[in-house]
Amino acid sequence: MQTRILAFTGIRSDYDLMSGVFRALRDDPQFDISLIVSGAHLSPTYGLSVRNIEADEIPILCRIESLLDSNSSSGRLKSAAILLQGCLPIVEAHAPDLILYAGDREDVIVGALTGAYLRIPTVHFFSGDHASDANVDNPVRHAASKLSTFHFVTHPSHAQRLQRMGEPPERIRIVGNPALDRFVSTPPMTREELLASLSKTEWQRYALIIYHPILGEEEQAARHFEQVLSAVEESGLPAFVNYPNVDAGSREIIAAMERWQAHEGFTFFKNLSSEQFVNLMRHAEVLVGNSSAGILEAPLLPLAVVNVGSRQRGRLAADNVIFVDQDPDAIRQGIEQALSEEFQQRLRHVVSPYGRGDSVQKVINALRDLPAQQLLNKTEDPLQ
């Protein structure tokens, strides 16, 4: 009898983390996998990344247009409410054996609430991680963990944190980061092939910029982003620039992108194929911004990262990451350090703390033997 699995995904970043797991579940006769697709996936403004899911041929159970184009903090909460209301009858009718979700965004807390109230076992991927950046995503991640039945974590320290929160070891599986598997399995493109596919054959070296707005700094989002662009421009490197996520302040960043379109040294993109994006990271000289990709995926390559500002601070990071303040001089100095021969030599010895790209099979093996019904009731007392 197949195990019917339903997974939530609301943005390209969380799909990238889980796409290898979804493909493996699709191809395994023991499992029946389908997705609830929502949020930015269905937005033309952010690149219609649902096309990546369609290209991977992962079954989509339903598409819920939940994303409000409000550019406000309350908009995220309203979008979560739309998703919750929209998904409940679908989940009830589908009656999955297990619900999966990954990370720390709205669809995660919606998936966790849905499973808890409908008494469906749930698995939270990337739980137990922690950042000290005061972003709302961090407490959302921990709140979802307390609602979840099981935790598939990327590092032993994350398992320890969950146990400090009162989650017993039998609910936790250490599997590493399944997103790394695609950096091992994706066919390599030469730099020339990659740049030709992106219509930039005249470029020889380049930086990659991924910068997202920060809660509480929405009004400064454009100025902060333009500081990053200016610093990279001064380094002499052209750059591919990823669109921001959908958080409050993203509209200001997009407006700044439009102002910088005339600069020859920048190419802005909303969404790339998985093959293009993986190879874009493989061949980049440096990643500048504040994306979790610099923390979670870049060490495997290894790729030098300049993490700007408070976002991602406090997370477990390898020696490929240089943390700098949101300050023009600090950003310039960080890029200079990352490109230095000394730092590039240091990169050769970087070891990813999140695995070696062999996590997907660990996930599948763990799902095969998961005592879902036995541990459905969360009766543990953290004081005992």
Image: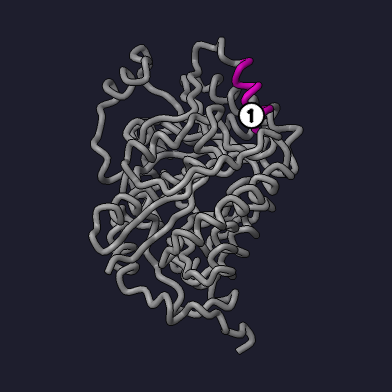
Mark 1: which secondary structure?
A: helix
Where residue 3 sits, quadrant-wise, is bottom left
Residue toward you, 85 or 271: 85
Is residue 253 rendered to the left or right of residue 39? right
Asked if residue 93 can be seen in this view, the reply is: yes
Residue drawn at point x = 26 percent, y = 64 percent: 30
Asked if residue 133 can be seen in this view, the reply is: no
Indicate whether 117 appears above or below 336: below
Range drawn in magenta: 250-259
Look at label 1 and name its amino acid: Phe
What count of labels does the image hold?
1
Q: Position of residue 31 (x, y in %)?
A: 30, 61
Task: Name the image quarter holding the N terminus.
Answer: bottom left
Q: Position of residue 381 (x, y in %)?
A: 61, 85
Q: How many C-alpha atoms fall within 10 Å of the one at disc 1: few (<14), some, or many (≥20)?
A: many
Residue drawn at point x = 55 percent, y = 68 percent: 118
Indicate whether 230 appears above or below 27: above
Q: Which residue is mark 1?
A: 225
Where residue 110 sits, quadrant-wise, is bottom right
Residue drawn at point x = 73 percent, y = 36 percent: 218
Q: Position of residue 158 (x, y in %)?
A: 50, 66
Is residue 319 rendered to the left or right of residue 22? right
Indicate whether 46 appears above or below 132: above
Q: Main secondary structure of the magenta part?
A: helix
Q: Position of residue 19 (x, y in %)?
A: 37, 47
Q: Is residue 302 magenta?
A: no
Residue drawn at point x = 40 percent, y = 46 percent: 60
